[in-house]
Image (cartoon, helix red, strand yellow):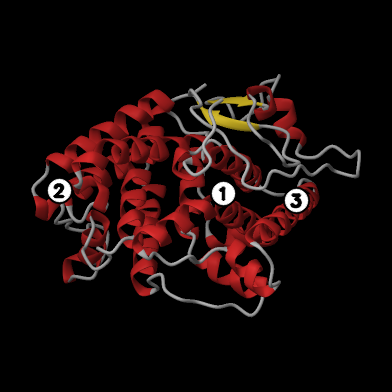
Amino acid sequence: MRPITCSFDPVGISFKAESKQESFEFLREAVSHSVPGLENCNVFDPNSLGVPWPTSLPAAAQCKYWKEAEEAAAELMDQIVAAAPGEQGSLPSEMAVSSKKAAKRRELLDTSVSAPMNMFPAANAPRARIMAKANLLIFMHDDVIESESVEQPTIIDSALADTATPNGKGVEILWQNRIFKEFSEETNREDPVVGPVFLQGILNWVQHTREKLPGSMTFSSLNEYIDYRIGDFAVDFCDAALMLTCEIFLTPADMEPLAKLHRLYMTHFSLTNDLYSYNKEIVAQQENGAAVINAVKVLEQLLDTTPRAAKVVLRAFLWDLELQINEELTRLSGAGLSPSQWRFARGMVEVCAGNLFYSATCLRYAKPGLRGV
């Protein structure tokens, strides 16, 4: 297991199921028995580690190759920092402040490893390295987007620009940025089928962040916000990451029977992120004027209530989503899915559990009100 440095619960109120019915049995079984597809994982009950676990999900899985992922993220960070300014692109503003640089580096490396190793735990060692590098590029871009330097291009902005050139169409894209070029080559060597889809998923998200820059937004309902949030949550990347780490490939037609579960999963994924990251976003707003576009804020405004009460409502909403996810997974178990479809369906549940564990132990989110484990 990767060492845990902190844990927190943003709500502080426990929920307990009224029903005695067991849920997500494959995860529960994997704590003590070998379950196909989780050979590269350590599966555990977070309660046994002292991590707040207010969820009906009985366990979480973590990739065994987290040390390899740490090495890969650190190597890429060193490469970026040592690169010429035009190649490294815009960096998070803290990286330019001597008193903040080391702490920001630690935070980025921790997040870039913890997120994929917990959310996409089925990866083998080479794919764990790829996931860590991808997340480092994504989190660095995300920090730039949230800061006052939002107009300056990042490494993956430059890669996105390459796809818009005449040389950016077709199988071979001539990446101008050496750092992204090497990353893309490593990814495509490991999986020539899913690799290009995975890379395009990253770039689709980057394009979305540039087209819809954070700003003042209001929503007339929680469902309207969820529609926006799912679109903002790198769906293509998450789907490709699940296929890459589970070593499967699904076409759009293959995904159709999974549509209901997929919507529930992406809603749980994105709203969990909102619940746990809310305090971080408030601090960012206070420090540099960053926008707060978050389900807690939406509920606070719709219900004319306090952030504390809005968090309680959101936690209850997530709990109900889990019941719906379990019901749909149970239905799909008898729906004649292919092995790859069923692996993807199960993988969505693994992501939900991993995202909760990651969020509850994430230094990036826990700094306000931090407590050690």
Horizontal and vertical percent for residue 288? 34, 61
- Which residue in the protein does label 2 denote? 178
- Picture quadrant of residue 225: bottom right
Instruction: Tell whether 148 sits left or right of 54.
Output: left
- What secondary structure is found at the residue carrying circle 3? helix
Q: Nearer the viewer, mark 3 or mark 1?
A: 1
What is the CA distance from the residue labelled 2 to the residue labelled 1? 35 Å
Amino acid type, mark 1: Tyr
- Rendered residue at 31%/27% (across/down): 71
Q: Which callout, 3 or 1, points at the residue further toward the start of the chain?
A: 1
Q: Which callout, 3 or 2, points at the residue further toward the start of the chain?
A: 2
Instruction: Tell whether 126 sits left or right of 295.
Output: left
- Which residue in the protein does label 3 denote? 319
- What secondary structure is found at the residue carrying circle 1? helix
Horizontal and vertical percent for residue 86? 10, 55
Q: Which mark is residue 196?
A: none
- Picture quadrant of residue 212: bottom left
Instruction: Tell whether 172 sits left or right of 228.
Output: left
